[in-house]
Image (cartoon, rainbow, N blue to C red):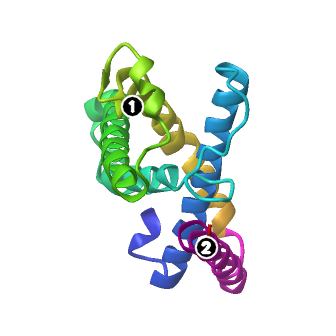
């Protein structure tokens, strides 16, 4: 996110659209791994779209970057650097919880349900829409994302040429748009 002021705006948008999809796919994989190997429920497509992605994870990741960017930029305050990981953890947990709660209402209005209604079985939950244990997991995952994964994606996506980034982002956008048309208009 540091290139906000220095990069070409179109490349910035393309790069973070690619990141959005990478995190949406990563989120889908996380959900499937939980479902198949941890909870042993069997496989089902955990996303609301046909393809292997959960857009809520992409939105969450980009929101983490946007909201936590000012905090991550502060490096010259020693005491803040000591507690920064804790603040990032809390910020990620709160942001993810708010996004998950809002998404549950949006999905319920649009489709009649939301995919994570199993939260009713969790000890501390609110209307089976959010749960403390998942908020803590998202806080941990978000912290790992901010400190380890996003810097790696930044380095990887800084290497290709503008033309390559354009081709990849436009292609991925076409796939996502086709999936949205198929999911919401045809299926």
Q: Is residue 120 visible?
A: yes
Q: Any mark on residue 138, and which?
A: none
Please give the name of the residue rendered at 48% of the width and 44% of the height, measured from the top-left corner: 146
Marks 1 and 2 sit apart, C-alpha to C-alpha, by 45 Å
Q: Residues within 10 Å of mark 1 (few under 14, many from 20)?
A: some
Residue 115 is situated, as x and y percent measured from the top left of the image, at 50, 41
Which quarter of the image is occupied by the C terminus? bottom right
Q: Residue furthest top?
A: 123
Tally of marks: 2
- Residue 154 vs residue 54, the one in the foreground: 54
Q: Residues within 10 Å of mark 2 (few under 14, many from 20)?
A: few
Please give the name of the residue rendered at 68% of the width and 59% of the height, measured from the top-left corner: 51
**Looking at the image, residue 123 lies above or below residue 87:** above
**Looking at the image, residue 136 lies above or below residue 16:** above
Q: Is residue 48 left or right of residue 33?
A: left
Residue 130 is situated, as x and y percent measured from the top left of the image, at 35, 32
Residue beneath disc 1: 85
- Residue 183 vs residue 103, the one in the foreground: 183
Q: Is residue 81 visible?
A: no
Q: Any mark on residue 186, and which?
A: 2
Image quadrant in which you'd find residue 113: top left
Q: Which residues are magenta?
A: 159-186
């Amino acid at each position: 996110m540091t290139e906000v002021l220095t990069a070409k705006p179109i490349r910035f948008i393309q790069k973070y659209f690619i990141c959005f999809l990478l995190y949406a796919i990563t989120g889908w994989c996380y959900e499937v791994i939980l479902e198949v190997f941890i909870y042993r429920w069997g496989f089902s497509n955990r996303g609301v779209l046909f393809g292997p992605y959960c857009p809520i994870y992409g939105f969450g990741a980009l929101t983490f970057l946007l909201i936590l960017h000012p905090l991550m930029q502060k490096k010259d305050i020693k005491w803040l650097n000591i507690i920064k990981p804790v603040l990032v953890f809390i910020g990620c947990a709160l942001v993810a919880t708010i996004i998950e709660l809002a998404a549950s209402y949006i999905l319920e209005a649009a489709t009649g349900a939301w995919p994570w209604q199993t939260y009713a079985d969790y000890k501390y939950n609110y209307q089976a829409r959010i749960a403390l244990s998942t908020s803590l997991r998202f806080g941990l995952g978000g912290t790992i994302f901010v400190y380890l994964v996003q810097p790696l994606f930044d380095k990887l996506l800084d290497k290709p040429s503008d033309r390559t980034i354009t081709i990849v982002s436009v292609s991925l956008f076409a796939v996502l748009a086709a999936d949205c048309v198929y999911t919401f208009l045809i299926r």
